[in-house]
Amino acid sequence: MSRKPLLDIKNLNVHYITHEGTTKAINDLNLALYPGETLGLVGETGAGKTTTALSMMQLVPDPPGKIISGEILYHDQDLTKLSEHELRKIRGNQISMIFQDPMTSLNPIMTVGDQIREGILLHQKVDMATATKRASDMLEVVGIPMERYNEYPHQFSGGMKQRVVIAIALSCNPEILIADEPTTALDVTIQAQVLQLMENLKKDFNTSMLMITHDLGVVANVCDHVAIMYAGTVIEHAEKHMLYRTPKHPYTQGLFGSIPNVEENVDRLKPIMGLMPDPTNLPTGCTFHPRCPHAMDICQVEFPRITRLNDEHWVRCHLYSADEEVSHE
């Protein structure tokens, strides 16, 4: 692809090292986020989606977490090589994150307005009055009356708390917004409102977004490209419509096969057999081979490389390794 990625993750490996053993959370992960795009990162619980996000923010808890190898390039600077002082200038300013649970993301003893203002004062060279005005304006932007500036998180519903978290994340107009399952704790009608709000704000602020989710319906609504994650690595990456029409990896095909389709008259859905592998004891070769209906001998011994199918679609699977294999760049 000729466009230059805004954020480019190359061959990332992250382990959690404890007395019980080493958990291989991220394995040779490649991922690129382009300017103005929304990229959906999809996978089961335990696939490594949140660890990927924390790696981008350099917030993997250490110990026990450790980035073993790989690069996370943002404007050609490797975030894994920056000092804590340099990272603080980027976090919350150029790259912001909406964490999974809004209930625990907010400080219970600070007013919501002050929590928005805190980030503005930290990253922007403005006085207190200007920061307060901006914080009030951000509340209005996310659909909360500025009169509620001095209220505390416990006075807000779950959906309203999530709006406050979004206001904090967008208060410094970041280039990249990482949303880690931002609608998981919300009911369906509030989910739709929050997703629509995020989509509108992304366009207004010209922000690139990484949407982490296990919900393919959310991806269909808001994402441009999709990365499917399994056992700590991206196994398929494609433009959204291309992936939904012609999924290539057996795991991706299994995901779509396990979702009800109103256009098909079937008695039973087709579940993916077996369970996600234990990250402390991953299978050799392709990590999906014990569950794969198309597994071959090579799948048991050799980790599949990336095979590019076209400019918008690549896959890690030996079924396609006869095609030309190239890197994801």
Image: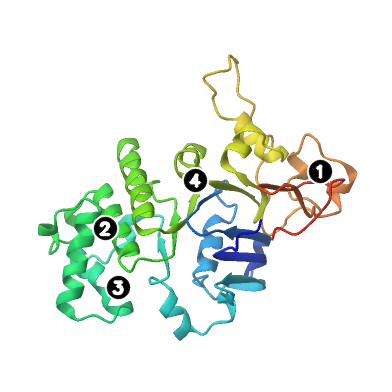
Q: CA distance from mark 1 to mark 3?
A: 47 Å
Q: Which residue carries the number 3 mark?
A: 119
> Regarding mark 3 in the picture, which secondary structure is present there?
helix
Q: Are marks 1 and 4 in contact (CB under 8 Å)?
A: no
228 or 223, nearer to the observer: 223
Q: Which residue carries the number 4 mark?
A: 223
For marks 2 and 1, give the one nearer the viewer. Answer: 1
> Regarding mark 2 in the picture, which secondary structure is present there?
helix
Q: How many marks?
A: 4
Quarter assignment of residue 31: bottom right
- Residue at the outermost left position: 147
Q: Which residue carries the number 2 mark?
A: 164
Q: Which residue carries the number 1 mark?
A: 320
Residue 121 in the figure: left or right of residue 152: right
Q: Earlier in the sequence, mark 3 or mark 2?
A: 3
Residue displayed at 12% across by 64% down: 150
Q: Report x, y in % for residue 214.
A: 52, 44
Q: Amino acid at mark 3?
A: Gly
Q: CA distance from mark 1 to mark 4?
A: 26 Å
Q: CA distance from mark 4 to mark 2?
A: 22 Å
Q: Residues within 10 Å of mark 1 (few under 14, many from 20)?
A: some
Q: Residues within 10 Å of mark 3 (few under 14, many from 20)?
A: many
Q: Earlier in the sequence, mark 1 or mark 4?
A: 4
Q: Are marks 3 and 2 in contact (CB under 8 Å)?
A: no
Q: Report x, y in % for residue 265.
A: 58, 14
Q: Amino acid at mark 4?
A: Cys
Circle on res. 44: none
Q: Earlier in the sequence, mark 4 or mark 2?
A: 2
Q: Earlier in the sequence, mark 3 or mark 4?
A: 3
Residue displayed at 88% across by 48% down: 298
Residue displayed at 77% across by 46% down: 317
216 or 20, nearer to the observer: 216
